[in-house]
């Protein structure tokens, strides 16, 4: 995919530098924004045992500032639906599906179907909450059916900021992605890393929002540039109460 070239800021982390592909033609750096709406709940309204089944729906729009002088444009739209089962209070297994519409710069738009399986572990750590999510997903190109497998490991830690106000948490996290097979989506091996931080504010018992930063580093295919985007992240989420 063709990408526009912009200056990459000095002081890139050693972690990102160590991941650079020797075949890649440099790094494209750009600004971005990820905005999403999330709904979640359980099947407790069906039966008391249904509370162990957790569902969620999320739609996220991703913007990029990669087309000067036109500047901001929609690069990607993702829709997730998922269902999980709470085996123990700190352990959940789930499955889901994501559909994504992508609009690369200077290339035809395309769509992906992404079924996935995941396991989520939650721990108390350092006075806060540590969440580990392991996900295995398939990326299926809708216009041709080619399949790329991707393994994702995410780790997020959050801590309440009661000295500021009740209902405010700070969070930091990282997600690493590895592709076991070569496909139209890229070569096998390391493919992406995400670093995130921000604040969660609970507006009510059910309604909350996350505001923060997400740095996304994506390894390029041979002959193309790696991509590093600095994204403002905003998520409005609503949790339906159990019955």
Image (tube, rainbow, N blue to C red):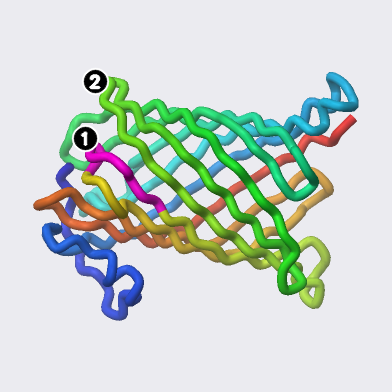
Which numbered marker is on residue 122?
none
Q: Is residue 114 rendered to the left or right of residue 124? A: left
Q: Locate residue 141, reporting x and y percent.
A: 30, 26
Which residue is identified by label 1? Answer: 184
Q: Going 39% across and 58% down the picture, which residue do you hit?
A: 193
Pick whichever, 83 or 217, lies toward us: 83
Q: Going 67% across and 33% down the picture, which residue do you hit?
A: 84
Q: Locate residue 49, reporting x and y percent.
A: 86, 27
Q: Is residue 44 rendered to the left or right of residue 202? A: right
Pick whichever, 33 or 153, lies toward us: 153
Which residue is identified by label 2? Answer: 144
Quarter the N terminus occupies: top left
Labels 2 and 1: the sequence-earlier one = 2
Q: Locate residue 99, reporting x and y percent.
A: 44, 28
Q: Is residue 89 rendered to the left or right of residue 59? A: right
Q: Residues within 10 Å of mark 1 (few under 14, many from 20)?
A: few
Q: Going 28% across and 36% down the picture, which residue do you hit?
A: 103
Label 2 sits on a secondary structure element that is loop
Label 1 sits on a secondary structure element that is loop
- Quarter of the image for residue 125 reads bottom right
Residue contact between numbered discs 2 and 1, judged by CB atoms under 8 Å: yes
Q: Is residue 210 rendered to the left or right of residue 101? A: right
Q: Is residue 4 depicted above or below 73 in this figure?
A: below
Dominant SS of magenta comes to loop
Q: Which residues are magenta?
A: 177-186
């Amino acid at each position: 995919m063709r990408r526009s070239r912009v200056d990459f800021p000095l002081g890139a982390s050693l972690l990102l530098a160590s991941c650079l592909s020797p075949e890649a033609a440099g790094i494209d750096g750009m600004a971005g924004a990820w905005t999403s709406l999330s709904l979640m709940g359980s099947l407790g309204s069906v039966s008391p045992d249904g509370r162990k089944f957790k569902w969620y729906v999320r739609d996220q729009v991703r913007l990029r500032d990669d087309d000067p002088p036109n500047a901001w444009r929609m690069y990607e739209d993702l829709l997730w639906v998922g269902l999980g089962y709470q085996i123990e209070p700190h352990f959940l297994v789930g499955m889901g599906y994501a559909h994504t519409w992508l609009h690369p710069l200077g290339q035809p738009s395309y769509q992906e179907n992404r079924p996935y399986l995941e396991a989520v572990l939650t721990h108390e750590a350092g006075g806060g909450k540590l969440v580990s999510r392991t996900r295995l997903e398939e990326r299926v190109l809708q216009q041709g059916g080619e399949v790329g497998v991707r393994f994702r490991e995410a780790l997020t830690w959050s801590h309440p900021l009661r000295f500021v106000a009740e209902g405010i948490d700070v969070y930091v996290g990282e997600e690493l992605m590895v592709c076991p097979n070569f496909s139209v989506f890229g070569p096998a091996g390391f493919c992406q890393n995400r670093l995130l931080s921000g604040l969660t504010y609970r507006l009510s018992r059910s309604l909350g929002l996350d505001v923060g930063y997400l740095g996304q580093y994506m390894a390029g295919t041979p002959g193309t540039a790696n991509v590093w985007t600095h994204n403002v992240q905003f998520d409005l989420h609503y949790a339906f109460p159990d019955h």
